[in-house]
Image (cartoon, rainbow, N blue to C red):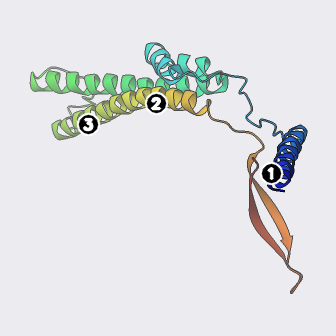
Amino acid sequence: MLNKQLYIFFVLIYLAIFQSFSQESSVLKIKDTVFENSTSYDPLAPSKAAFYSAILPGLGQAYNKKYWKIPFVYAALGSGIYLYSVNNSNYNRVRNSFKLRKNNKPDEFDGLDGKPFLSEDALISAQETYKKDRDLSLLVSVGLYVLQIIEASTNAHLLQHNVNNNLTINPKLIKNTVNNKTIVGAQINFNF
């Protein structure tokens, strides 16, 4: 009798094992949802864009394929250089007039009948003003030059981020059912 029970026990174990192998056909298969990015990540892109902008202003923006920014770069830098040039020439005019007046020679601000258009104090004040404006326009030009380098580098860095419709912020009009008024809201979607 013990042999018969052992025999039945082994047959049941064998059938249980055989039955468990038959479940292998119903294995759950999950699709991979990781999308391959069409453009590969280039860690040196921000450095290249900054280097190109440092060599020639606007070249970093061209490297980033943001061609519409190039006229703004040149307009900003050209304005700063133009203001520097104007203030420097006015400073030199007033300074030369002041030197000529100190040596009792005629200058461009002499006027008529010995009555000068500008006094010596006015010439000194004009020199200080033009010198301050010249130095400020030089500082602004250098700041704009550095800013366009930083902009090209930052833009190259941000171009490598994933920005698609799965990450969106959409404005939405919601109808309030209690008082029948429209409410403006924002909806943030994160689709994975």
Image quarter of residue 126: top left
Q: CA distance from mark 2 to mark 3?
A: 36 Å
Q: Please provide percent x and percent y for residue 136.
A: 32, 35
Q: Earlier in the sequence, mark 3 or mark 1?
A: 1
Image quarter of residue 82: top left
Of marks 3 and 1, the one in the foreground:
1
Task: Tell me what residue is drawn at x 31 percent, y 24 percent.
Answer: 88
Q: Is residue 16 left or right of residue 60?
A: right
- Secondary element under disc 3, as helix, strand or loop, is helix
| Crowdedness near tag 2: few (<14), some (14–19) or many (≥20) residues, C-alpha within 10 Å | some
Of marks 2 and 3, the one in the foreground:
2
Q: Earlier in the sequence, mark 2 or mark 1?
A: 1
**Nearest the camera: 55 or 109?**
55
Q: Is residue 155 left or right of residue 186?
A: left
- Please identify the residue farthest to the top as the structure is shown: 55
Residue type at the position of mark 3: Ala
Q: Earlier in the sequence, mark 2 or mark 3?
A: 3
Task: Tell me what residue is drawn at x 27 percent, y 31 percent.
Answer: 112
The residue where tag 2 is placed is 150
Residue 17, compared with residue 116, is above or below; it is below
Is any atom of residue 174 visible in this view?
yes
The quarter of the rendered structure image containing the N terminus is bottom right
Q: Is residue 182 left or right of residue 133?
A: right
Task: Tell me what residue is drawn at x 20 percent, y 31 percent.
Answer: 114
The residue where tag 1 is placed is 6
The residue where tag 3 is placed is 126
Q: Is residue 153 left or right of residue 111?
A: right
Q: Please provide percent x and percent y for residue 108.
A: 28, 24
